[in-house]
Image (cartoon, rainbow, N blue to C red):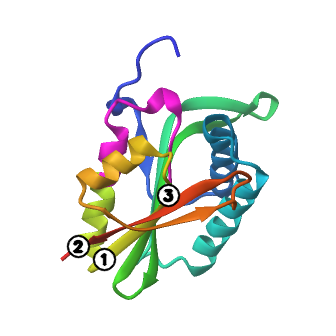
Amino acid sequence: MSKRVDLNDIVIRTELVTGDIGVITYLHGLLYKAECGFGVSFEAYVAQGLAEFYKQYDPGKDRVWICEHGGQALWPEHRLMAPRIVGFLALMHRDIAVAQLRYFLLLPEFRGIGLGKKLMGLYMEQLKHAGYRSTYLWTTREQETAISLYKRYGFQLKEEIPSNAFGKPLYEQRYELNVY
């Protein structure tokens, strides 16, 4: 990017459209391979989870925040332009009072501008609006920056297990937060 991106340059929408599930899966696969050395098994895990999210989607209980910046020509000959997805977060209901935070992703060039904090604020507002009593998330120990953000919002580490699920040895961690 030639100029520094500002938070005001980002559009956040809350509805899935055609192509989103594929793009989010693709971005997770590429980013986590580059930054963490995760294998194809991680991309498959994300694809499976996003399919589950879509199948059980309830607009009163679930929410996505899709962050877009600018536009890109997909097929110029057909004048098909699409905004570039640069971030994503999902709130997925697990039962009547429990939600799961999933698929939090920010492309590297869009970190450090307050977008992560903005998404977490929107997530927390939606938890309260929808009446959830608790929320949780799974991450890996190496996601130190994200974990720091979760802790600032009150999430606490409740479980840690060794895993080889994503193509390499790591520790998966479960963080929880009581909303009320």
Q: Which of the pair 138/22 is nearer the observer?
A: 138
Label placed on residue 134: 1
Q: Is residue 113 magenta?
A: yes
Q: Amino acid at mark 2?
A: Val
Query: Left or right: 14 with respect to 29?
Result: left
Q: Residue sitting at 54 percent across and 76 percent down? A: 57
Question: In front: mark 1 or mark 3?
Answer: 3
Q: Residue furthest right?
A: 77
User: In the picture shown, does residue 45 fall above or below 55?
Assistant: above
Q: Secondary structure at mark 1?
A: strand
Task: Using the rendered image of the protein, determine whether residue 106 is visible from the camera's viewpoint.
Answer: yes
Q: Residue sitting at 53 percent across and 35 percent down? A: 107
What residue does disc 3 label? Answer: 139
For marks 3 and 2 on the same chain, the one whose residue lies earlier in the sequence: 3
10 Å crowding of disc 2: few (<14), some (14-19), many (20+): some
Label placed on residue 179: 2
Q: Amino acid at mark 1?
A: Ser
Magenta part of the protein: which range? 104-120
Q: Secondary structure at mark 2?
A: loop
Q: Amino acid at mark 3?
A: Thr
Q: Which of the pair 106/33 is nearer the observer?
A: 33
